[in-house]
Image (cartoon, rainbow, N blue to C red):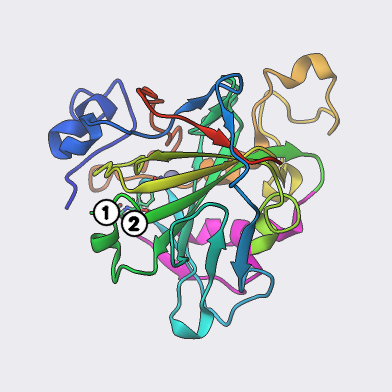
Amino acid sequence: SEGAWCYDSQDPKCGPTHWKEIAPACGGPAQSPINIDLHLVRRDLTLRPFIFHGYDSAPPGPWTLENDGHTVLLHVDTGPQSRLEMQGAGLPLPAYRALQLHFHWGGPGRAGSEHSLDGQRRPMEMHVVHMNTRYQSMGEARAHPDGLAVLAVFLAEQDSDNANFSALVSGLKNVSARGVSVDLASTFPLASLLPGASGLSRYYRYWGSLTTPGCEPAVLWTVFEDAVPIGRAQVGPPRLPWAGLPATRPPFLTGSAPHPQVAQFQSVTQAGPPGSQPAPLTENFRPQQPLGGRRVSASPG
Ligand code: B30
Ligand code: ZN
C-alpha cells in the first residue's frame, strides 16, 4: 500500500518530509515518535503491571527473521499453538497479541532510538508490535485507534554479551540483503528481551501512530524507562578508530565512541539500483513529532 519511502532527509524524493505525499496520515495529528519530557508526565495509578501470557517460555516456532529494507523484523506469531498475548497495564480489552518485533538504530557513533527521555536518545530501540485480538488482521487493526499496542524498549551497550540476543544477532548475517527471510535456529522467551523481570520497569504511555508510512494513528505506545543491555563483543570486533583499545574505555571517551554492537545491525543493507553495491541500512529512525495536545502518563513504577 505504501510507495517508495526512505529515512534520508537529504533525499529529494523519499525522505520523511515526503511521507505525507504517499501516506496522508504522516502529516496528520497524533504522530510518533516523540520526546518524553519527564517534568510534564502525569502519574497514573491505573497503569498497573502488564499481564503476559506465553512470554516466559520458548514457543514452538519457527520464528522468521526478515530484512524488509527498512528494518530487521522477527515474526513471532506462528499461529494458534503459540499464542503470545498481553493484558492489563491500562490496555483496552480484551487483549493484544504479539506479531513481530523489529529495531531502529543509528549510524557509526550516532544513537538511533526513535523515542527519547528528556532529549536523551539511546543507541537502539526495539518495538514489539501487538494487535488487538478483537481485529482479524493488521489491515483492519490499522484502521482503529485501539488497533495496535507497541512496546518500545531502549537498548544500551554493555561490555559483556547479552545471551538473550544471541539467536537473533546470529541470524543477522543471513538477512543482510533486502527482501531476505530466514527461519531462526531457535525461539526464546519473549520476556528475556524485556526490561526487568517480564517488563517490571516503569513505563510511559501515550496515544500515537506507526512511525513508518502509512503512519496510521492506531497505536497505544508503551515506552519502558529501563533499557535492556546488548553486548558489544557478541556483535563483532570494534571498528576504527577504536580497534585495539581495551574493552573498557576512559569515561571521557564513551560519549563520542561508536556503538560497536550496533555494527551488526548496520551491516544489514537496503535497496539499491540493480547491480550496484548495496548500501548499509543505517539511521532508520523517524524524526520526532509534535506532542500537540496529547498527554504522556507514567506508571507508578
Ligand atoms: S512501528 O512500531 O511504529 N515502527 C508496522 C508496524 C509497526 C511499526 C511500523 C510499521 C507495520 O506493520 N507496517 C506494515 C508492514 N511492514 C512491515 C514493517 O513492520 O515495517 C511492511 C512494510 O515494509 O511496509 Cu517495513
Ligand atoms: Zn518501529
Instruction: Check if mark 2's residue and mark 1's residue have beta carbons within 8 Å.
Output: yes
On residue 248, the disc is none
Residue at point 48% right, 33% down? 114
- As shown in the figure, which amino acid type bears the numbered disc 1? His
Q: Where's residue 22, x and y in %? A: 15, 38
Question: Between 71 and 24, which is closer to the camera in this rendering?
Answer: 24
Q: Is mark 2 within 8 Å of ligand 1?
A: no
Decide if residue 141 is on the left or right side of residue 236. left
Q: Give residue 255's position: percent from left, percent from top.
A: 70, 18
- The residue that disc 1 covers is 144
Range shown magenta? 161-190
Which residue is identified by label 2? 147
123 sits left or right of 158 in the view:
left
For residue 242, above or below residue 231: above
Residue 60 found in image quarter: bottom right
Image coordinates of residue 290 in percent, x first then y, are: 36, 22
Q: Is residue 176 magenta?
A: yes
